[in-house]
Image: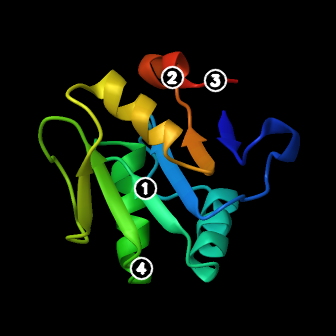
């Protein structure tokens, strides 16, 4: 399941100036789905600030995609420690644990693209929809 945009009535439209890229560490595809890559390209064209996590799976794939585009307006959100920052982007500690980090990153964005695989339990707990 893929969600993007805020609010849900405007699903598919990027709103505001901050886009959150979040997803399950269980996501194992080797590249982003085309519809998601196009939305990220749209965010880049609008010079949106992109917030992204640093876990394996979807977040790593998002980071690799952003790096391939040479995009610099990126902040990597983390909890206690940084695991992955391929672009040497700015970092921000959003909490002391995964649940707190994801909750605060969700609160800090205007729009979100979320790749949801299997249960993605912490993400589901933090979504307000």
The residue labelled by disc 4 is 71
Quick one: label 4 or label 2, which is nearer the N terminus? Answer: 4
The residue labelled by disc 1 is 51
- In the picture shown, does residue 15 fall above or below 43? above
Residue 66 found in image quarter: bottom left
The reply to whether discs 2 and 1 touch (Cβ–Cβ < 8 Å) is no
The residue labelled by disc 3 is 128
Point out the frontmost of discs 3 and 4: 3
Q: How is the image coloured?
A: rainbow
The residue labelled by disc 2 is 126
- For the point 80% across and 45% down, the residue is 11
Point out the frontmost of discs 4 and 2: 2
- Label 2 to label 3: alpha-carbon separation: 6 Å
Looking at the picture, how far across and down is residue 77, in whole percent? Answer: 31, 48
Helix, strand or loop under label 1: strand
Looking at the picture, how far across and down is residue 51, in whole percent? Answer: 43, 55
| In this picture, residue 51 sits left or right of residue 37 | left
């Amino acid at each position: 399941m893929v969600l993007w945009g805020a609010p849900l009535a405007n699903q598919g439209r990027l709103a505001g100036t901050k886009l959150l890229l979040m997803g399950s560490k269980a996501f194992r595809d080797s590249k982003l789905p085309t519809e998601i890559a196009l939305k990220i390209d749209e965010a880049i064209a609008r010079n949106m600030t992109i917030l992204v996590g640093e876990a394996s799976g979807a977040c790593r794939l998002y980071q690799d995609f952003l790096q391939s585009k040479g995009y610099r307006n990126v902040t990597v959100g983390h909890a206690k420690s940084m695991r992955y920052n391929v672009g040497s982007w700015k970092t921000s500690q959003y909490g002391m644990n995964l649940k707190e980090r994801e909750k605060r990153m969700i609160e800090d964005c205007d729009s979100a693209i979320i790749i949801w695989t299997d249960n993605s339990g912490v993400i589901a707990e933090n979504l307000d929809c």
